[in-house]
Amino acid sequence: MARVVFTANLRRHVDCPETEADGATVREALDAVFATNEILRGYVLDDQAALRRHMGVIVDGIALRDRRALSDPVGPTSRIYVLQALSGG
Amino acid sequence: MSDRLLVSTRKGLFTIERKHGAWSIARVDFLADNVTLALCDRRDGRTYAALNHGHFGAKLHRSAGAGWEEIAAPAYPVKPEGLIDRDGWGKDIPYSLLEIFSLETGGPGEPGLLWCGTIPGGLFRSRDHGASWELIRSLWDNPKRRKWMGGGTEWPAIHSICVDPRDANIVRIGVSCGGVWETRDGGGAWACRADGMFAAFMPPDQGRDPDVQDPHRLVQSPSAPDRLWAQHHNGIFRSDDAAQSWVEVTDVPPSSFGFAVAVHPKEPDTAWFAPGVKDEQRIPVDGKLVVTRTRDAGRSFDVLRAGLPQQHAYDVVYRHALSVDETGDRLAFGSTTGGLWISEDQGDHWRELSHTLPPIHAVRFVD
């Protein structure tokens, strides 16, 4: 299972401890997390389920390429970091 | 007489209370977070707070016991693949909640019903105290909605919602920039009601187009609901026929530019404004902070300055940051530079509560 880690800046607003999730893509892994934490979904994704403009995701050291569909692949030992991008004030 | 005031600021929600004749900060919620609006529902006592976290989006919280619980924020529907939906400037409209820009209760006979206006131009309704929201599709799908434009905000903004006190199915909203819109059947059909307004920011032949007007704030008289006031980008407008037509109020000292307007709850001819140098500057005229008041439907104005800074004051009063209580005697306003003033005599005299608060988005008395 992939390891999913959320920025501490996000943990200030919504409960989102480091966790593990199944999934072959970032979308699948994050959906697995959001399935038990619906409020968290809206902090990371916008209304179209795309990554929020000033959020960033890094999978095994590589920045997410498909910010709209989140189709970047995830392996069983991947580490997914959900971060606040240093943009937007 | 209201003894409580909700002050929404860039860095938290401040509750101001009057005790033993003195106003003071009684409570701070969401400290350090951007609270853009607050609403107390007099029907059930619940309080709502709209936040905008920027990176993490716009959120809505509801009072729960001594604290708060996060509830659903209005959400835009999935944008159909291939749909072209552009605003009046030709830009692709984002189908995503960018900010909660107005929040009002439904009628007294509609417990739990809330209206919510948003950026980029969607109007939402909740029938369950904000637990869930529906986009008012009849307005969103109206072809004229695509003429709306951003004004002070990048995208169209529904900033004012007036539920008619005679019939809660009649709702009027103010859109910046998109005019005034009215439904008479609880959100089924909509018509633009901005005849008489003019927009100097448009090409001359489009200046009177109702669909592109930029009312900054719209309020309705509770005691004579055919009377509405609008602080518009290009001046002050008044309607005497329930928004069927608008007339400009002219010769307003020191300026008719501003964002906020409040109407007396019992005297429809009495209204207050917070003027500034017109749009390209947006600062108090001559650095003197004043409130203007008319008592005769706009034929004349008092310029109220007692207790307000009269030199090097660069406070701007945003559209939701001027409030009058249910008696019409108490007024409060807050500024972009963190000033908060209260009057207990309809604006004749002001007392500064603070000038070191965070930038103030909204001020509202709790009746």
Image (cartoon, coloured by chain):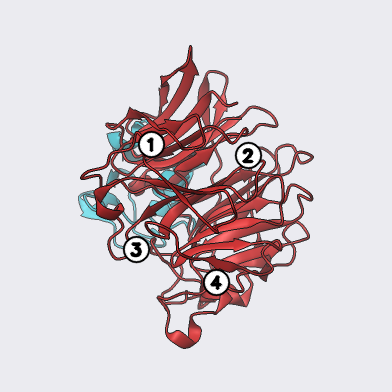
Whichever of labels 4 and 3 marks the residue nearer the N terminus, that label is 4
Q: Quadrant of the C terminus of chain B?
A: top right
Query: Disc 2 vs disc 3: Cβ atoms closer than 8 Å?
Result: no
Shade of chain B as shown in the rendered figure = red
Which residue is identified by label 3? B278
Q: Which residue is mark 1?
A: A20
In the image, residue A37 sits, relative to residue B159, either above or below, namely above
Q: Are marks 1 and 2 on the same chain?
A: no
Q: Nearer the viewer, mark 1 or mark 3?
A: 3
In front of the other: B126 or B7 = B7
Do marks 1 and 4 both belong to one polypeptide chain?
Answer: no
Label 1–label 4 contact, CB within 8 A? no
Q: Which mark is residue B296?
A: none
Q: Residue at x 61, y 68 (%)?
A: B246
Residue B122 visible, this orientation: no
- Packing grade of label 4 (10 A; few <14, some 14-19, many >=20) is many
Q: Residue at x 34, y 64 (%)?
A: B279
Above or below — where is B76 with respect to B222? below
For label 2, the residue is B131
Q: Are labels 1 and 3 on one chain? A: no
